[in-house]
Amino acid sequence: MPGIKELVVILVLATVTFRLAKPIALQFSSESDFCRRRNLWLVLTAAGLLSPNFWLFALLAVPLLYWGQRKDTNPVAFYLALLQVIPPVNIDIPIVGINQLFPLNIYRLLAVCVLVPAALRYRRRRQPGSAAPGFGTLDVLLIGYGLLTTVLYVPPDLPNHVILPDSFTNLLRRGFLFLLDVYVIYFAVDRTCSSRGAIADALAAYCISCALLAPIAIFETANSWLLYVDMAVRWTGDPGWGFYTMRGTTLRAMASTGGPISLGFMLALAFGFWLYLGSHVKSRWTRGAVISLYVLGMLAAYSRGPWTGALAIYLVFAAIGPGAFRRVFKAVAVLAIAVGGLLASPLGDRMISVIPFMGGSVDSSTIRYREHLAERSWELIKENPFLGDQLAMQKMEDLRQGMGIIDLVNTYANVALFYGLVGLFLFAGFILLGLRRDHQLAKLVAQSDPDLALLGATLVACIVGMLVMLASSSLYWQYAIMFYVLGGLAGAYARLGAPARTAAGSTAPGTSRE
């Protein structure tokens, strides 16, 4: 039966990981929530690997996901725990009269079955005039960006410069998918993670889901065997899903993420979240073991962008809070020792071979391509600076690669090209405003509530690291989801500081304390 061997390997690795992770997880979530998330992860993994098609998997997954989020005390943590249970394989929804409604995948199943019900419950329970958060600046910026991307039609890049015409149906589809893929994620996270414990639970659930990915990735690279690709090929009939990505002679792992860059990105953020969660773990050995697991998983993904992002996360985290100079000095020293150890290990030659400033030449063409992309994009942006050029792809034939695609591996260039500096302002302003608010709160409570300040430092560092990684990747799949998840967490965290801001204002010079 197809998928049996892969399933056995994955279940063995997952069972061990869940067993080791349980004592840590119970510091941030209840035992019933942890067991439910674990059991559903195992059941849905088995269903995905053994099902002959996506629809049979969905038939089982939909009622289980809906039931699970109803039982869970934190639907956002439940969502993040199952975010990567299977690869994001797109399956078109057929409908009479048109070719397809829109593609369905695990992310949209989770959004419909988990986040939409959570958001609706929040709306029903929120009383008019209550202290619950309402429509704010982050909402305005995000919805403004959504309206812009809905109204401005960017045709797909098809062979022979064929331009598909737009239609009212397409406009409605873009608007609906913005709500489902973007705003629902942000809204559910921002509104329902209303306490420090809920945010910590969400971070822990994400870290456990990535702790499952890391050993699978290490196994894949060590054995030159991708465990999820046969399932994706079976569901889609597309042999491209079975493509093994190599860097030199080494297989780049991807586990259930669908790509090595996506895997590295997720593990880099998990590393950042763990910087806060690890402060609640007494065992220094355990803290180091979890970091080592994420680092080895990132090395198995063999992606330079996530390595850079993880480095940025670590240094920014160290630079925020009291004693910044000492913390940064310590971080640099630890980083130097860790990198030195890796370079001296059998992995050293592999790392050096892909780092140009250390003399590496493997896949150096991808760096030159990114440089060329940046130059060409800036030329086109200057021609249509405000609302962009929705036909920019037609003017970038010099960037078409051997696989026949123009790979826009820079999110900021991508947004500015098609939606102009107005679109870039709305897109970047959304996350930068959240970052600014979190940084201000982390500084404000550094002395009075060090734990809350540490949580803020983690979110700020992860947002900065994500922004670094987006400079070398498109906003797709996990990048897009975690961009809006972090935006929601930033908004939720900023509201935790209302009492601290009130206290700070009441004791300001010239202010009465009575």
Image: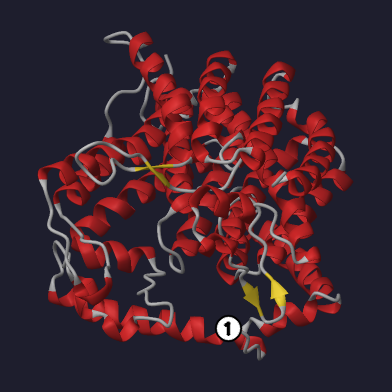
Q: Residue 126: which quarter of the image?
A: top left
Q: Nearer the viewer, residue 402 or 145?
A: 402
Q: Residue 337: which quarter of the image?
A: bottom right
Tell which residue pokes out farthest to the front in this image.
1
The picture places residue 167, in percent across and down from the top left corner, at: 11, 48
SS category of the residue bearing label 1: loop
* Color scheme of the displayed model: secondary structure
Residue 403's place in the image compared with 275, above or below, is below
Asked whether the viewer can see residue 205, the reply is: yes
Residue plotted at (21% across, 61% down): 155
Residue 437's place in the image compared with 31, above or below, is below
As drawn, is 171 to the left or to the right of 41? left
Q: Nearer the viewer, residue 216 or 415?
A: 216
How many labels, in total?
Answer: 1
The picture places residue 355, in percent across and down from the top left corner, at: 63, 82
Residue 158's place in the image compared with 10, above or below, is below
Residue 392's place in the image compared with 357, above or below, is above
Please give the residue where the numbered disc 1 appears in the rendered image.
363
Q: Nearer the viewer, residue 181 or 192?
A: 181
The picture places residue 366, in percent across and down from the top left corner, at: 50, 81
Callout 1 amino acid: Asp
Asked whether the viewer can see residue 448, the reply is: no
Q: Nearer the viewer, residue 130 or 171?
A: 171
Determine crowd level at label 1: few under 14, some 14-19, many 20+ residues with C-alpha closer than 10 A.
Answer: some
Considering the image in quadrants, where does the C terminus appear? Answer: top left
